[in-house]
Amino acid sequence: MHPTLDGKVALVTGAGRGIGRAIALKLARHGARLVLNDLDPEPAQQLAAEIGAAGGMAVVCAGSVSAPDFADRLVGTAMRSYQGIDIIVNNAGYTWDNVIQRMSDEQWYAMVDVHLTAPFRILRAAQPVIRELVRQENAGGTASVRKVVNISSVAGVFGNAGQVNYAAAKAGVVGMTQALAKEWGRLRTTVNCVAFGLIRTRLTGNAADGGTETIDGRAIKVGVNPELLAAMESGIPLGRAGTPEDAAGAVYLFTLPESDYVSGQILLCTGGLTGI
């Protein structure tokens, strides 16, 4: 069988662990050539080596997606390595929760920067490149459909207590997706969004374990209150939290040729949960 994404160039942010890693592996297994980003170089490099050992192709562009120069570095890496861009998955992110009266400006801007400003900058940097690639295709009598998949959350669709910063940023991702679907149709580029529900990763484990992660130089408490976690899982119609592989499958749907006429859509990957 012909790989569904044979030769496509896919940029995936936050690809070193969890959902991003699963997305990158999914796309690579179906023939895509990857540009892998992670805040930490080591997991991204390990993943690139794993993809290479399996016969695929992957290069690394490490660093914070929130850095002002990151978008140009990411797009530049793709063009130097592969001379093209076909798929962009804006996945990188984390949560930094608090109720509004205790939330600092730093917490607010950290979430807006990583979840909304960073994808905006990446897509802004990619637009002239994609426009030129489309111009070349038109001149040569060829045509291909490019894909953008932005990652949101049920918190951005329905809101979630204690996450006003994260929910606002993820709601912004929905609006950005729908606006760019209208702008980029002329570039034969679909722009869609996957909103995840409860997906089991290191960031959504049991908070009783007392875990912290150092993210962008900040020590961030991770995990969910165990009672809340149990209540959330019990409310999922499919009866369980999702896996990173479940999440990757939803993203993959929007990269397939069968979705070439689907744009501006928000797909809930929640196990049937329609509110939180």
Image (tube, helix red, strand yellow):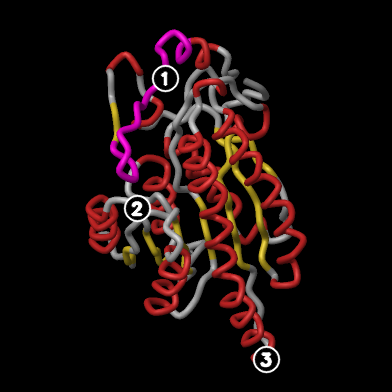
Query: What residue is shown at x 67% (from left), y 33% (from top)?
Result: 157
Give the number of the mark in front: 3 or 1: 1
Residue furthest bottom in the image = 139
Count residues near mark 1 (Cα–Cα under 10 Å), then give few for <14, some for 14-19, many for 20+. some
The label on residue 224 is: 1
CA gap between label 3 and label 2 equals: 36 Å
Note whether 232 is above or below 3 in the view shown.
Answer: above
Q: Is residue 202 left or right of residue 260?
A: left
Query: What residue is shown at x 50% (from left), y 40% (from top)?
Result: 111
Q: Identify the residue position indicated by label 2 in the image.
A: 38
Q: Secondary structure at mark 1?
A: loop
CA gap between label 1 and label 2 equals: 23 Å
Could you say which is closer to the camera, residue 123 or residue 85? Answer: 123
Look at label 2 and name its amino acid.
Asp
Specify the quadrant of the image occupied by residue 189. Answer: bottom right
Which of the marked residues, 3 or 1, is nearer the chain's N terminus? 3
Q: Is residue 79 left or right of residue 274?
A: left
**Residue 63: % across, % down:** 34, 57
Could you say which is closer to the camera, residue 270 or residue 122? Answer: 122
Which of the marked residues, 3 or 2, is nearer the chain's N terminus? 2
Q: Identify the residue position indicated by label 3 in the image.
A: 139
Note whether 203 is above or below 125 in the view shown.
Answer: above
Q: Which residues are magenta?
A: 214-230
Could you say which is closer to the camera, residue 276 or residue 261? Answer: 276
